[in-house]
Amino acid sequence: MPKVLIAGAGLVGALNACYFAQKGWDVEVYEFRPDIRKMEHVPGRSINLALSDRGKAALEGVGLKEYIVQQGVPLYGRLVHDKDGKTFHRIPYGQPGQHIVSINRRHLNEVMITLAEKSPNVRFFFEHKVKSVNVEKQELTVICDGIELTQKAELILGCDGAYSAVRRSLAAYPRFDFAQEYIEHGYVELNILPKNKDFALEPNAFHLWPRGDYTMIALANRDHTFTVTIFAPFRVFEEQMSNDSDIIKFFEENFHDALELMGRAHVLETFHRVRPQSLVSIKCKPHHFGKSVLLTGDAAHAMVPFYGQGMNCGFEDCLVLSEIIDQHANDIPKALRVYSETRVKDAHNIIDLAMYNYEELKDLVNHTSYKLRKKLDLILNRWLPETWIPLYSMVTFTRIPYSQVVQNRKWQDDLLRRVHTSLFLGFLAAGSAIGYLLVKKRNLL
């Protein structure tokens, strides 16, 4: 059987290992970090993620869907908290029953690594830093204890995240397009602890505090805690949250209800301990190189987290790649070309949608026009379930390719615009006709 080398044992790398283990391939996974199953604390990324249908489909492909979903907390819509700290309103995600699932990142990663390792043809090499890839020789070079090791395989997957060493070593590859953008906003993570051994907030909702240029969210965890994340421009962190009194003042003015649940001491301790983290968006084209090298997950398409699709898109990468390899009977060069041709445009579209959705989360959810459009979309979806699917539902509750999602939304917007124009012209014509008849009647009198 062929051999695959996987750079990175994070979520996408581990799931790819599971897929290739099922195919019977020889699998070697190289990871810079120690084995997270043996670590007391894993630094870095958020502890919870939002799993939607694309991610579920990918997990189902390796037999993990039901178990992982049971380990999470279902979220049926957004609960938008007003600035007064007392009132809120609900925005359902879709039709009754449709939901996403808040899951624990670390547990999910550990489960996939363990599942992959059950196969005798899979080996994980932790504390091995990926240095570079050689496309022509089909080789991956890693460093362990200061010693360089070079491995060769029919397929090499770069699953080593937004700051991918594999992608970096391909920077000079002919006709490789790469774009990186840091947005002006950063984030800080906080926590809400259980209240009387239970959730301090309603657990089955995505809690949202939109405040125009900044926002805060909270997702429930199975241990009855909430992971809270505040997103704001770096200048806001620097100018309005530079000392203890300013931090507390900022939270009291904007997130009073959440501050009472988190506690002032916890908020101050967190801001003393961590600095706001940056958010990067990355596009590249192509995703494949030569006959054997492929970028997947954040290494190929890092995106801001505001559509909850980073993990789901990365997991769908694994499923799509597996399906295409099967369709082409392990013809790796052909499979990589086909994969790259289809996946690049989808990746670029969801990256753009994620950028757009931040405008929605931090401000648009408070606008009457936004609320009316959401209600109209759901009504039309109930009447025409196969024809009219809301944007969020297409992204979250289907596997419609992201590029097709964007085209469908454009069609919907154009149709509503034409209907609106027709109604306006109709009312204008009716008004003119009525006016003409009234004038004519008056002249006759």
Image: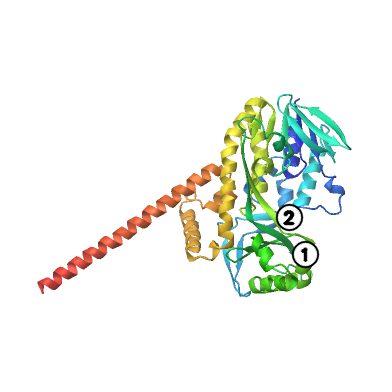
Instruction: Please tell me in which quadrant of the rendered image residue 85 appears.
Output: bottom right
Question: Which residue appears at 50% of the width and 63% of the height?
Answer: 371
**Residue under pointer 2:** 46
Q: Earlier in the sequence, mark 2 or mark 1?
A: 2
Classify mark 2: residues with Cα within 10 Å, few (<14), some (14-19) or many (20+): some
Specify whether 102 is left or right of 126. Answer: left
Classify mark 1: residues with Cα within 10 Å, few (<14), some (14-19) or many (20+): some
Work out whether residue 127 or residue 384 is closer to the camera in this orientation and state it: 127
Work out whether residue 364 or residue 392 is closer to the camera in this orientation and state it: 364
Residue that lies at the very extreme toward the left in this rendered image: 444
The nearer-to-camera label among 2 and 1 is 1
Specify whether 272 is left or right of 51. Answer: right
Which amino acid, by three-letter code, is at mark 2?
A: Ser
Tell me how many marks there are: 2
**Residue under pointer 1:** 270
Residue 420: % across, % down: 37, 57
Work out whether 318 lies above or below 51: above
Residue 327: % across, % down: 62, 29
Q: Give the quadrant of the N terminus.
A: top right
Query: What element does badge 1 sit on?
Result: helix
Work out whether 433 lies above or below 127: below
